[in-house]
Image (cartoon, rainbow, N blue to C red):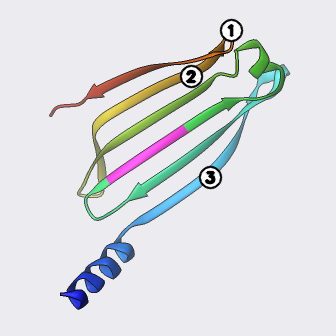
């Protein structure tokens, strides 16, 4: 049993992939206003893509430290991503109270 579990863990870790990167967010004459971290996680049949955008500097101050998170989860079929759900989360500090707006969409075929 222990051997089967070990083989299963090794196989699943070989099939799973993860990729992350960071981008600067620039707006015309204002220059850099934030950063965006993007991650992609895949296993044999499913994926999750997450983007977290954070304001920095003066833009953060003007938007009450706004952070937006977008998450797409779904299946991988024939090399294509088929979304099953999409989440949008907006978080800010408003009068020292942290709040979030969450939008969840379940996508049907």
Q: Are marks 2 and 3 in contact (CB under 8 Å)?
A: no
CA–CA distance in space, label 2 to label 3: 21 Å
90 in relation to 74, above or below: above
Q: Which residues are magenta?
A: 47-51
The magenta stretch spans residue 48: yes
Q: Are marks 1 and 3 in contact (CB under 8 Å)?
A: no
Judge by depth and name the residue closer to the eye, 22 or 60: 60
Res. 106 image quadrant: top left
Indicate the position of residue 8 as horizontal and vertical percent values: 26, 79
Residue at left offset 73%, top offset 31%: 34
Residue at left offset 83%, top offset 20%: 58
Indicate the position of residue 80 as horizontal and vertical percent values: 30, 51
Label disc, if present, on residue 21 of the rendered structure: 3
Report the magenta stretch's main SS.
strand
Nearest to N terminus: mark 1 or mark 3: 3
Say which element carries label 3: strand
Nearest to N terminus: mark 2 or mark 3: 3
Say which element carries label 2: strand
Indicate the position of residue 65 as horizontal and vertical percent values: 70, 22
Q: Residue furthest top?
A: 95
Camera-near label (1 vs 3) is: 1
44 in relation to 37, above or below: below
Q: Give the residue pinned by disc 2.
A: 91
Residue at left offset 42%, top offset 56%: 41
């Amino acid at each position: 049993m222990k051997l089967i579990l070990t083989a299963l863990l090794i196989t699943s870790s070989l099939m799973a992939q993860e990729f992350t990167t960071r981008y600067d967010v620039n707006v015309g004459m204002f220059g850099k206003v934030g950063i965006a971290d993007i991650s992609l996680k895949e296993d044999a049949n499913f994926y999750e893509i997450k983007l977290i955008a954070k304001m920095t500097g003066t833009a953060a101050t003007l938007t009450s430290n706004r952070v937006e998170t977008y998450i797409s989860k779904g299946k991988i079929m024939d090399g294509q991503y088929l979304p099953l759900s999409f989440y949008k989360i907006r978080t800010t500090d408003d009068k020292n109270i942290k709040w979030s707006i969450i939008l969840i969409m379940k996508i049907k075929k």
